[in-house]
Amino acid sequence: MSAAIELDNVVATYRNGLFGGGSKIQALNGISLELRSGEVFAFLGPNGAGKTTTINILMGFLFPDSGTVRVMGYPPGDVRAKRQIGFLPENFAFYGYLTGEQLLRFHIRLAGPQKLPGDAVIPEMLAKVKLDGYPGLKIGKFSRGMVQRIGLAQALMHDPQLIILDEPTSGLDPVGRKEVRELILSLKAQGKTVFLSSHILSEVEQVCDRIAIVEKGSLKQMGAVKDLLNQASLIEIVVDQLPPELETDLIAQSATVTRLENCVKLTIPSEQKREVLERLWTAGCDLISLNARKSSLEDLFLQLVGEGHPE
């Protein structure tokens, strides 16, 4: 199966401050990954990890300092690649004086004659994103969720093979988020490739085949979701008490500590079970219960990047 996206040892830097005259900051530090055709792939990380920089490079908006990038077999920005890409950025704005139908007609024309689907597809696309009940309503009068939906529609209008989505459920209510999940799965069923970035990890876990987690421009972990979650299994330990100095040490080793009314609950990576139990016994703690817990993507994310990052 051919690769839809290939990044090989990609490095990107920029300078902060006015006119780029400030200190040099490394946005990407040797990122390498391959996105297979027909899969749903999530690119995850805390704010400032390099996700937006990577997406801008894939779209041809920025150029890396070094490394190789290929999108649909072509260099980023090549019109042959762009014709096959549907893109929804995190922060976007449309002409408020257009209706949803007019905006989609405009984007059909932008797609060029090679991908021109014809205006007949517009009602179908509006229905797909649940906007068919608002004929004549200007985008300037849309709610935040409606704007997000029309954004998804414009990204899919020209039947792209690769869809790049940055926070696709931003501004949507729970029903809208469920519909977007179903839409992503339907795109996969059609053989499309989806590359998405999202902070809503529970949704990523439901729709993605593989994930990559980045922090400070470096790749921390990559693999199939089910395999990574199996590796990141957790143990819940409940004890009668926990000395403060031991609590500090365990938290530094990735434990989560919750003090309850008559006991203390610890959540630890399964590979630390023997060591932690021995330390608790030595400290005079009585064990109340011990249970294995299925790890979530959020658990894995926090183990890898910590809890001190703003989302």
Image: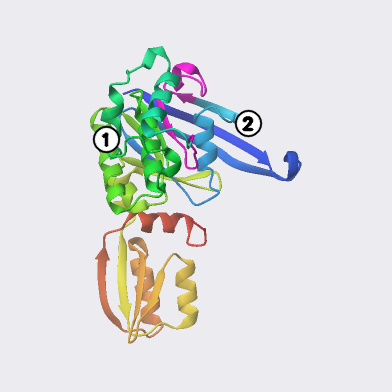
Q: Which residue is label 2 attached to? A: 65
Amino acid tagged 2: Asp
Q: Is residue 65 left or right of residue 184?
A: right
Of circles 1 and 2, the one toward us is 1
Depth check: 265 or 17 in front?
Answer: 17
Spot occupied by residue 146 in the image (x, y as percentages of width and height):
37, 43
Q: Is residue 281 above or below residue 271?
A: below
Q: Is residue 256 above or below residue 112?
A: below
Residue 76 lies in magenta, yes or no?
Answer: yes
Is residue 31 visible from the viewing direction of this image?
no
Query: Picture quarter containing residue 184?
Result: top left
Callout 1 crowding tier (Cα within 10 Å): few <14, some 14–19, many ≥20 = some
Spot occupied by residue 110 in the image (x, y as percentages of width and height):
45, 20
How far is mark 1 from mark 2, CA to CA? 40 Å
Magenta segment, principal secondary structure? loop
Of pointers 1 and 2, the one earlier in the residue sequence: 2
Amino acid tagged 1: Lys
Depth check: 85 or 140 in front?
Answer: 140
Q: Is residue 34 left or right of residue 135?
A: right
Q: Which residue is label 1 attached to? A: 128
- Residue under the image location 50 percent in, 42 percent down: 91
Depth check: 242 or 172 in front?
Answer: 172
- Residue under the image location 45 percent in, 55 percent down: 304
Residue 219 lies in magenta, yes or no?
Answer: no
Is residue 269 visible from the viewing direction of this image?
yes
- Residue under the image location 59 percent in, 35 percent down: 11
- Residue under the image location 47 percent in, 24 percent down: 70
Spot occupied by residue 165 in the image (x, y as percentages of width and height):
41, 38
In the rendered structure, which segment of residues is drawn in magenta?
70-95
Spot occupied by residue 78 in the image (x, y as percentages of width and height):
50, 19
